[in-house]
Image (tube, grey):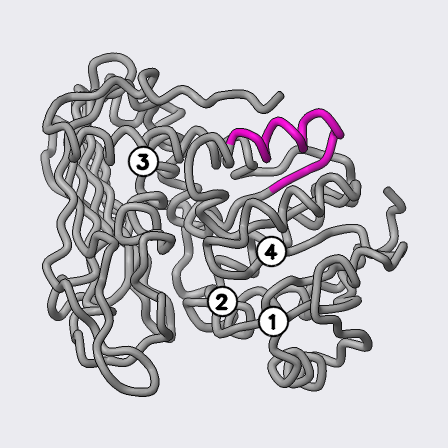
Amino acid sequence: MRTDRLRVGIVGVGTWANMAHLPAFAAKANCVLAAVADQDAQRAEAACRRFGIAHRYRTLDELLAREDVDLIDVCTGTAGHYALSMQAIEAGKHVLCEKPLGRDLDEAYGLAAAAKRRSLLTAVGFTFRHSPAVQRFKALIDDGYVGRIYHVQGFEQNSLYHDPTQPRPAGWWGQGDAGALGGYASHLVDLVRWTVGDFEEVVGDMQTFIPERAVNGGGMGRSECDDSTMFLAKLAGGVQGVFQASWLAAGRPPGVEIRVFGDRGGLKLHLTEHPDGDETLLGADIAEGIYRPVAGIEPAQWPMEEWPQFYFSRLVSNFADAVLAGGTAEGSFEDGWRCQQVLDAVALASRERRWVRTEEVSPVPAH
């Protein structure tokens, strides 16, 4: 890898790409947006015009014909993540992919294994890892602030899809969609794996409370993915976990809340979407028993941009620097498949109404 600038190709330039991916790479001084690929020619043209990108294509095949692209960013719908990421890896490109990596554990594991064989760096869109408060949260746990951890609670609840009359593209709510489990709980699982420990056993319940939703162009379509999922977990070391992911929580904005309690104290982490950013990290020790703001983060100094873009900008910056320096990337495809293993275990537990050990859903290596 040359050490001057990273040339990036982005596949899929829809809403989230325009909100986060494209602005993040455009703002990174050592990155160049070399090309985009999207089947919607008008959408690709608009992205190129807005971000000053010289080349646009309809397919990843066409984009990969360029020899000057170092990294592929896959920002399509869930159904395309596996095939496009694998194609980029086989072409020898470093890859950033939105979550979830694939439609199941085998696909996620296959991507991680393929990238490892080729010594390529990868990253999943686990944006919350790059929050200053989350990173301080992890550092405090690692330093023994809460001591031996007894239990952890995690919630990602909002009302983004509370209204079933809000039109969405046909197929938006199909089985290929990540749902609340894959789209929301994946953040919780990744953060807890990273900060507290591995999941060993889960039991849960997935629900679709709104079975029909409006689709673009008129009419209603069947919703086949979960809109609320809750689960209990047993983690390494006997830690107990309680989690919920829902997009039907009236009055709540997007965000994440995690609480950790141990024999020396507790931590409460709360991230909420707000134009100015809203991060709260509170800590309490056993002696005093009062939660107070934790030193070490300075909310007044960030974010430099609005909340939806801020964490992703940090993710892109950290990943690009790792690729250029030949370092290690946080939130890699390895983390992606291990997160998917937990999600698949929750889904199995919901179907079979029982506790499921995560090792029961081990991946099948591709031949």
Report, in whole angstroms, how far the alpha carbon at label 2 lies from the one at label 1: 8 Å
Report which residue position mark 2 lands on.
Answer: 309
Report which residue position mark 4 lands on.
Answer: 74
Left or right of 358: which side holds 86? Answer: right
* Residue 247, image x, y percentages: 21, 61
Left or right of 163: which side holds 343? Answer: right
Q: Earlier in the sequence, mark 2 or mark 4?
A: 4
Q: Earlier in the sequence, mark 2 or mark 1?
A: 1
Of circles 3 and 1, which is in front?
3
Q: Earlier in the sequence, mark 3 or mark 2?
A: 2
Is 193 inside the magenta-drawn segment?
A: no
Of circles 1 and 4, which is in front?
4
Residue at the extreme top: 237
Report, in whole angstroms, how far the alpha carbon at label 3 lies from the one at label 1: 30 Å
| 231 shown above or below 12 | above
Report, in whole angstroms, how far the alpha carbon at label 2 lies from the one at label 4: 17 Å
Report which residue position mark 3 lands on.
Answer: 343
Q: Earlier in the sequence, mark 1 or mark 4?
A: 1
Is 112 inside the magenta-drawn segment?
A: yes
Rendered-image quadrant of the C terminus:
top right
Report, in whole angstroms, how far the alpha carbon at label 3 lies from the one at label 4: 21 Å
Q: Amino acid at mark 1?
A: Pro
CA neighbours of label 1 inside 10 A, class few (<14), some (14 to 19), many (20+) = some
| 130 shown above or below 311 | above
Left or right of 248: which side holds 12? Answer: right
Which span is picked out in magenta? 109-122
| 66 shown above or below 138 | below
Q: Earlier in the sequence, mark 3 or mark 1?
A: 1
Report which residue position mark 1 lands on.
Answer: 23
